[in-house]
Image (spheres, rainbow, N blue to C red):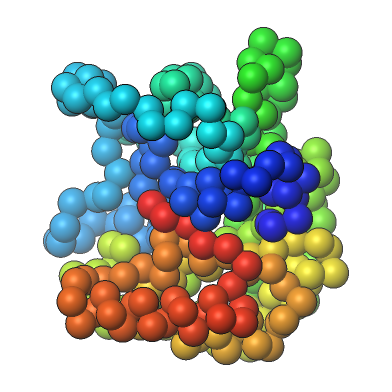
Amino acid sequence: MENHERRLHKTPALRRTLLAGSAGLVGAAAAASGLAILLRTRRRRGPPAIQASIRQDWLDRRKEAIIEPELPIIDPHHHLWDRPYRYLFQDLRADVGSGHKIVATLFAECGAMYRTDGPVELKSLGETEFVTGVVRKGASGKYRSTRYIAGIIGYVDLRTGSQAKGVLEQHMAVSDGRLRSIRNGSASHSDPSLRIYAGAPPGLLLDRDFREGFAALAPLGLGFEVWAIQTQLKEVVNLARAFPQTTIVLDHLGGPLGCRTLCREARRGVHQVARRHLRGGKLS
């Protein structure tokens, strides 16, 4: 992702705005993945869902002055979806138009608008097709101040191994060349209370079939976004060492789980990943 982000906007402020970029322009919902969406739709006891409808009355209670209104910002991680709650193009426009100088945005996969028929491995094409339609709307000339969805972080199940390359190429084709990277939800933990946030199969990043699919990314010019938690950062390091040519971006700064001891462990893990292998990180 680093290369395409550099192409989007050449400015000394770019690096810090990208690394400090948030999934949450005001009102944006929390991150999700293709795997996590399936887990969250099942009925279970536990904590409430982490997404919720936009409460404009609550947001309007407090207004803060923008510290650097002329600072160019790329929002590197937002979603679009229509569930019982929705966050669609007009909601994104409202957030982008809040006063910050948002020059471009990147869409991150969230399990939205999947195809309802056809092979399972191709259903996520529906999301890329949907987002590409939104891109065309945003590029119509009416909204010139911001490049909406200048890049797409898509979902392809890399566990399909050798078949992943063909599916990736289809996503690239339907995205009008905007596909920049792939994200597979890999956050996993044995604690049942964390399952709503970390419900991916254990050891996904070490899985042989997953890595066979992962190997197709770099030759196609695609990067990978890691959604993992702090106890998995050694797996992230292992993956990065095995594929040094692949750009890896660490979502949510490695998923710290708590404070004090846990936060110290998380910092050490992120430092280990960043020392040699991390190309970027995101706050959210």
**Residue at (47, 51) in percent of width and height:** 20
140 or 210, nearer to the observer: 140
Q: Is residue 267 left or right of residue 249?
A: left
Q: Residue at x 25, y 50 (%)?
A: 49
- Of all residues, the one furthest to the top in this rendering is 142
Q: Position of residue 162 (x, y in %)?
A: 77, 76
Rendered image quadrant of residue 198: bottom left
Q: Which corner quadrant holds the N terminus?
A: bottom right
Specify the quadrant of the image occupied by residue 105.
Answer: top right
From the viewer's side, name the closer residue of 18 and 246. 18
Q: Is residue 73 visible?
A: yes
Direction from residue 241 to residue 233 in the image, left or right: left
Relative image position of residue 38 (x, y in whole percent): 41, 57
Q: Nearer the viewer, residue 75 or 28?
A: 75
Q: Nearer the viewer, residue 124 or 243?
A: 243
Above or below, comparing residue 218 to residue 269 in the picture: above
Residue 47 lies, with reference to residue 51, above or below; the image says below
Residue 280 rendering spot, x and y as whole percentages:
58, 63
- In this view of the protein, can residue 108 be seen by the observer? no
| 246 versus 51 height, above or below | below
Q: Is residue 101 above or below residue 105?
A: above
x%, y% of residue 22?
Answer: 44, 46
Q: Residue at x 64, y 19 (%)?
A: 145
At x 28% / y 62%, what residue is drawn?
Answer: 196
Report how many numbered discs are placed on residues in the image.
0
